[in-house]
Amino acid sequence: MFSVLPYASGLISTLINYLTGKDQVFQLLSTFELPKESLELIVNLLLDDFTKGLSADEQERSESPVKMLLTYVRAIPDGTEHGEFLALDLGGTNFRVLLISLNRGEVTMESDIYPLDQALMTSDGKTLFGYIAGCISLFVKKNKIKDRSLPLGFTFSFPNTSVDVVALVNDTTGTMMSCALSNPNVSAALILGTGSNACYMESLDNIPKWDGDQGHPQEVIVNTEWGAFGDNGSWNHLRTEFDEKVDSESLNPGMQLFEKMISGMYLGELVRLVCLNLIEKKLLFNGKAGKFTTKNSFPTKFVSEVESLDRYKINEVLNEMRVIASERDVDILQRVCAVVSVRAARLAAAGVVAIAKKTQNYKTTIAVDGSLFKKHPQFKRYMEETLKELLPEGEITLMLSEDGSGKGAALIAAVASKY
């Protein structure tokens, strides 16, 4: 007589394996969860590092991996700036020179892009800056401003070029200035791109190490360099085995640990490592790894595409990674991308809350720039939800900045020229 018991037993075994596998996946992904209590710890530890980083005591400053660099930029634009200003934007593959005209809040720009090859970028300083000076010379001749002395937003001086370098610029400060021109409520800025950093406006009364002019304005933009937060091991227990692997295989092990958990350079690699772990346990893609065995083969743009929930884009990612996926595999991949993205956004939001608490400003606008924030379809929402969770009474708006590195540099020059 035919028995259904072996068949039923096989189904039950398959179901048990499926459910057990599901539990294993959830257990692994749960290591990325950051409950409110953990985020509040991050906020308090970051606040402590902010205070130490601003201390006049050298020993106390050395205890903080967050260096709290003083930009000496004392004000944001108020709309009264006028005139013409030069700005320089030195990137990894090109160099941009901009002529920016300001007229009571209205901005017009002319710019040219000059290529930077690898030989130039790795040459000695004299060769590189000689090339940069030559580009500026070409630009001022083309725009017929050769015989005029214009303020320049940059950090270097060049011989035989009629410019006056008036401000120290980084992309975070430029982002803040760019948004502040149209929104005077901006009090801080955040970079969420390949790397991560934040700056904010701080009262001189709260900066014991301040060594500059004590006159007005009585505040200055502080560049936190928060990417190094945690380099002293203060919250190692919140890092996963995958964070440790990303760090150990990076170019700077033991450094920039906060940045390695929230920036675009590393999120894709975190996702790849989690997926590879699941593949090796035969919990994903039927144990077939495709390109997941190759370091950095899953860039953060793939994370954004999976998080878009667009099945066409997801299929393109799967094809690129050379794996065949079931519906369950797609669901797991989406969950992996989501937990890594959510954790990054929650950490970034905790950093924003720390700045809000440091300045006691809970109704403010934060300027944000960077490819991760711009291109990840869910990142802003994840951050906003976390801000409400940590500061239910707050009204913090995240404002996308446009061209902080270019327009922002010129605005810094414009503001610096007023004081």
Image: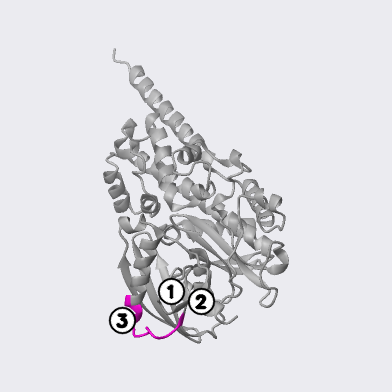
Proximity of marks 2 and 1: CB atoms separated by less than 8 Å: yes
Q: Earlier in the sequence, mark 3 or mark 2?
A: 3
Which residue carries the number 2 mark?
A: 413
Proximity of marks 1 and 3: CB atoms separated by less than 8 Å: no
**Please, what secondary structure does the residue beneath circle 2 have?**
helix
* Viewer-closest of 182 and 10: 182
Q: How was this image coloured?
A: one colour
Which residue carries the number 1 mark?
A: 87
Q: Is residue 140 magenta?
A: yes
* Viewer-closest of 231 and 86: 86
Quarter containing the N terminus? top left
Q: Residue furthest top?
A: 1
Q: Quadrant of residue 288?
A: top left
The magenta-colored residue range is 138-150
Q: Amino acid at mark 1?
A: Ala
**Please, what secondary structure does the residue beneath circle 1 have?**
strand
Instruction: Give the CA separation, mark 2 to mark 1.
Output: 8 Å
In-image side of 99 versus 244 (left or right):
left
